[in-house]
Image (cartoon, rainbow, N blue to C red):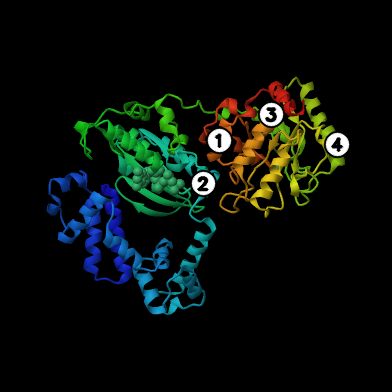
């Protein structure tokens, strides 16, 4: 375990001992040792090897043993036992702002409360206000913080994370003391949900940037602030971390803080196999942990690091230890899709069903974005709540779409609305419209909107049946999941992919950040089977048009290239492709 890891655990031990009400000298000893270790400029492993641990300030015999165990084995029985001796509810309470170890101990001692629910009930019942050191205000604060935690949880959708990250990145970029800066972590890897947002900056004046970062607009409170790092809570409940390094450290720090942890482990291993050491400070010509500048290899960019480790550049989206190393060794990484390759979206709504805009407005917006085409696929009749269209209204809409297209043609503009429908897949796999009607439409997306409760076999059969219809070009949001709110229904996705391969049906990557469905982890398989992807906004209003970019990021994460994605085709090519299943 490295220095930071050891420091973190020692600090946590101090906190846990405080919750248990141990003598304050003992708890402080752990916290002081943690700070000492955090400030070290050489790795603990080296200090231990040279038997110099005892010379460190404030680290007595018992602590030396614990630190040695952590550094050499990564584990510490004392810590594991201590953690197990405390009710988990008490440890969880540390997440509530305003609840330190002393307060947690007092509540547990005096009221016997050891769960979050118990704490909430005690606050609502006014029991806390009676304890010394507590008041009505504390109760109110705890309740608010609980609400906050429940509402936002600990994960966030990518659109919310980007809304926090992009303005701060812009702002950092324009700061005169910033040499280089980047988003790191799961957001740079384009994960569909994000824990916290990470920023990395290189500069010779870290203190200025810490001040600048912690005074950005939209910050609720500053969680931690040090010489080279800071953490803040943003409005909306997202945490953001900043790390400042010197510019020669930037590339290795960026690789380290981009992760994923799993990817980093393999990278470090590859370094060791080549007699090198890779950590957040650099790549070193050394057989042991070091930060010695004399041993540092000159890696200015991430490309340099990969090259030293005999790999082609691995884009951040692929850094999940899911095959990127094998492909990177053989120069077989795919050339990933770019979001500007996309020429339109084939699943969208208008105010004919539950969308906000008229056909004219939809067309104007898509044309303005530079799209070549945009399909109108309003809901079918069984989606009552979404104001689904019956046959008669579909036929009326066909005429209205044609009229919009005529007006573009007259202006010599090649943009086209495509006609279509998002046809409900009813129970048993029956489609909401007859073939005769679907035959008149350019695009049919078939999706499940009700009856999510079937068994895996039933749901799988239902969806495969829809794929077998020759008028259905695309299966929409195949699992029905809503990220962070609703789980996927039971489905054998591999069987659905196999059926799509057999029938020539495309699978949607629904780019709504609420869905990102089908999941990126399955595209690799689909691609191998030759199943094409359609990246769709499922737009209901103008703010949704930007989802194409989010979906393209997730498609990249699924290893997809331009040729795997149908809506990179030109209008002419697409029109031909749309007819393929029918011929
Ligand atoms: P998140 O925030 O939960 O969505 O996921 P990440 O990947 O952004 O994780 P985060 O913010 O905890 O840390 C950012 C990156 O820093 C992570 O992807 C890899 C690196 N990192 C952090 N802690 C460790 C660690 O203990 N070991 C290793 N190998 N890497 C770490
Ligand atoms: Ca993160
Ligand atoms: Ca973080
Ligand atoms: Zn839809």
Real-space Cα separation, disc 2 to disc 3, in angstroms: 30 Å
The residue carrying pointer 3 sits among few (fewer than 14), some (14 to 19) or many (20 or more) residues within 10 Å by Cα, namely: many
Residue 133 seen in the current view: no
Mark 1, Cα crowd under 10 Å, few <14 / some 14-19 / many 20+, is: some
Q: Nearer the viewer, residue 390 or 248?
A: 390
User: Disc 2 or disc 3, which is closer to the eye?
Assistant: 2
Placement of 458 over or under 509, stated as above or below: below
Q: Where is residue 34 shown, x and y percent of the image?
A: 25, 55
Which numbered marker is on residue 395? 4
Give me the disc on residue 367.
Answer: 3
Query: Contact (CB < 8 A) between labels 2 and 1?
Result: no
The crowd level at tag 4 (other Cα within 10 Å; few <14, some 14-19, many 20+) is some
Dot 4: element: helix
Whether residue 96 sits left or right of residue 1 in the image: it is: right
Lower sequence index among marks 2 and 3: 2
- Find the distance from the CA under tag 4 to the CA under tag 2: 40 Å
Give the mark nearest the N terminus, 3 or 1. 3
Q: Position of residue 384 (x, y in %)?
A: 78, 51
CA gap, disc 4 to disc 3? 24 Å
Direction from residue 213 to residue 10 in the image, left or right: left
Classify the position of the C terminus by image quarter.
top right
């Amino acid at each position: 375990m490295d220095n930071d890891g050891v420091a973190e655990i020692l600090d946590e031990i101090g906190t846990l001992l405080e919750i248990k009400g141990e003598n304050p000298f003992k708890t402080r000893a752990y916290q002081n040792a943690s700070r000492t270790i955090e400030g070290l400029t050489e790795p603990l492993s080296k200090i231990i090897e040279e038997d110099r641990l005892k010379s460190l300030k404030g680290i007595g015999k018992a602590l030396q043993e614990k630190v040695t165990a952590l550094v050499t084995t990564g584990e510490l029985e004392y810590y594991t036992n201590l953690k197990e001796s405390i009710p988990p509810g008490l440890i969880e309470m540390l997440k509530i702002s305003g609840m330190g170890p002393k307060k947690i101990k007092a509540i547990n001692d005096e009221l016997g409360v050891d769960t979050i629910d118990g704490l909430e009930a005690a606050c609502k019942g006014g029991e806390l206000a009676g304890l010394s050191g507590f008041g009505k205000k504390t109760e109110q604060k705890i309740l608010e913080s609980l609400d906050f935690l429940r509402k936002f949880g600990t994960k966030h959708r990518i659109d919310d994370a980007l809304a926090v990250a992009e303005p701060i990145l812009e702002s950092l970029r324009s700061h005169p003391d910033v040499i280089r800066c980047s988003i790191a972590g799961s957001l740079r890897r384009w994960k569909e949900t994000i824990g916290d947002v990470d920023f990395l900056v290189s500069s010779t004046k870290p203190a200025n940037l810490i001040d600048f970062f912690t005074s950005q607009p939209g910050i609720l409170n500053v969680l931690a602030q040090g010489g080279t790092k800071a953490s803040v809570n943003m409005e909306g409940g997202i945490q953001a971390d900043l790390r400042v390094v010197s510019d020669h450290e930037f590339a290795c720090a960026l690789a380290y803080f981009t992760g994923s942890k799993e990817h980093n482990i393999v990278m470090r291993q590859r370094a060791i196999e080549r007699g090198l050491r890779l950590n957040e400070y650099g790549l070193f010509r050394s057989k042991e942990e070091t930060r010695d500048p004399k041993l540092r290899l000159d890696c200015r960019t991430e490309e340099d690091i990969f090259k030293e480790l005999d790999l082609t550049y691995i884009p951040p989206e692929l850094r999940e230890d899911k095959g990127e190393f094998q492909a990177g060794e053989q120069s077989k990484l795919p050339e990933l899709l770019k979001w500007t390759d996309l020429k339109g979206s084939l699943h969208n709504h208008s105010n004919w069903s539950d969308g906000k805009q008229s056909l004219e407005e939809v067309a104007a917006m898509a044309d303005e974005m530079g799209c070549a085409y945009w399909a109108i696929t309003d809901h079918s009749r069984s989606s009552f709540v979404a104001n689904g269209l019956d046959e008669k209204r579909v036929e009326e809409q066909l005429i209205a779409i044609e009229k919009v297209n005529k007006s573009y043609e007259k202006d010599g503009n090649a943009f086209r609305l495509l006609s279509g429908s998002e046809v409900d897949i009813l129970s048993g796999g029956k489609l909401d419209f007859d073939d005769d009607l679907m035959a008149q439409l350019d695009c049919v997306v078939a999706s499940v909107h009700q009856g999510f409760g079937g068994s895996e076999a039933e749901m799988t059969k239902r969806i495969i049946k829809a794929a077998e219809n020759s008028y259905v070009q695309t299966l929409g949001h195949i699992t029905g999941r809503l990220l962070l709110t609703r789980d996927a229904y039971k489905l054998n996705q591999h069987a659905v992919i196999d059926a799509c391969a057999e029938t020539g049906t495309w699978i949607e990557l629904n780019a709504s950040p609420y869905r990102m469905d089908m999941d990126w982890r399955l595209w690799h398989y689909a691609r191998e089977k030759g199943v094409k992807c359609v990246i769709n906004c499922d737009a209901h209003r103008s703010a949704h048009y930007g989802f194409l970019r989010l979906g393209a990021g997730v498609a990249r994460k699924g290893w997809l290239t331009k040729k795997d994605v149908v809506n990179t085709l030109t209008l002419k090519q697409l029109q031909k492709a749309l007819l393929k299943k029918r011929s």
